[in-house]
Amino acid sequence: MKNTLKLLAIAALIILTTSGCGTQKPARQANYAGSRVRFKALIYYTEYAEEAHVQFAHQSIAFFKKLTVGDGFKVDVTTDLSGYTLEQLMEYSTIISVNAAPQSRAERELFEKYMKHGGGWIGFHAAAYNDRNTGWPWFLEFIGGGVFKCNNWPPQPALVEIDNARHPVTRNLPKEFVIPPSEFYQWTPEPRSNKDIEVLVSFSRKNYPIGLKDIVYGDDWPLVWTNRNYRMIYLNMGHGDEEYIDATQQLLFINALRWIVSRDPEGNPFDK
Ligand code: ZN
């Protein structure tokens, strides 16, 4: 009897504390993905970049965080990889570099180890920028061997073409589509000449000549590619505040995330 009373008291307390009172609405129980966090992603960026690259970084953080609705996955954000141990970094299925490559020696060494241990990487635009002063031979090999050659200016939309329409990143995209305004980097040697590189999306030659101030007149121009030796994808877009205005480009970015994460060394989190 004593126990029954105790249980009733507890039940009453639960009802009182969960039914709410006053005019405040109870919190909405939206749990679209169940409570399973399928994977973790780490966005890496810098505030010390040109304004358009910082704009893209902030919009990317908002974009990827919005995709976590329902806690299907977790996004953390950092401006300094050297605060992590390799073990901590390996908890992330992918690093998403939105406007910079790792800078300090400690960050670079850690990132290199992370990738060699099966880590994932999605890099946008300035994340692959390198020139004669970069001094990081492994990274040059990692991104396909290309050093910055030139760019169009000002940022503008461009027609792009799919190179491999059967690839998971591209198979639900139109064969040709126009992407939002961006600055695009061209590289030398161009990545397609590297046997380890698979190009997925290229700049259409119908765009040439492109630019009003800095004009690019031609040449093969891969925009999205992967290095088969790593779990990585690079996307040339990522300049300014208009990169997320287009559904097709958003789909490309989500496809890229899903493809990298689905090849996690621990197994495909979407199959579980
Ligand atoms: Zn740029």
Image (cartoon, grey):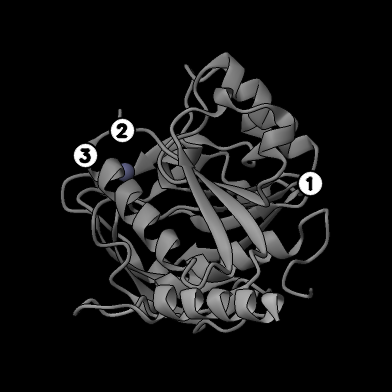
**Secondary structure at numbered mark 1:** loop
Disc 1 marks which residue? 229
Q: Residue 175's spot in the image, x, y percent?
A: 52, 82
Q: The C terminus is located in which quarter?
A: bottom right
Left or right: 270 in relation to 64: right
Asked if the beta carbon under badge 1 is closer than 8 A to the nearest atom of ligand 1, the reply is no
Is the C-beta separation of discs 2 and 3 under 8 Å? no
Disc 3 marks which residue? 51
**Which is in the foreground here, disc 2 or disc 1?**
2
Q: Residues within 10 Å of mark 1 (few under 14, many from 20)?
A: few
Q: Residues within 10 Å of mark 2 (few under 14, many from 20)?
A: some
Front residue (pair 56, 153): 56
| Label total for image | 3
Amino acid carrying mark 2 in the image: Glu
Cα separation between marks 2 and 3: 9 Å
Ligand 1's quadrant is top left
Asked if the beta carbon under badge 2 is closer than 8 A to the nearest atom of ligand 1, the reply is no
Q: Is residue 158 above or below residue 9?
A: above
Left or right: 34 in relation to 245: right
**Which is in the foreground here, disc 2 or disc 3?**
2
Q: Residue at x 67, y 74 (%)?
A: 168
Left or right: 68 in relation to 93: left
Is residue 30 among the parts visible in the rendering?
Answer: no
Q: The N terminus is located in which quarter?
A: bottom right
Q: Residue 3's spot in the image, x, y percent?
A: 70, 75
Q: Residue 24's spot in the image, x, y percent?
A: 23, 76
Disc 2 marks which residue? 47
Amino acid carrying mark 1 in the image: Asn
Amino acid carrying mark 3 in the image: Glu
Which sits earlier in the primary sequence, circle 3 or circle 1? 3
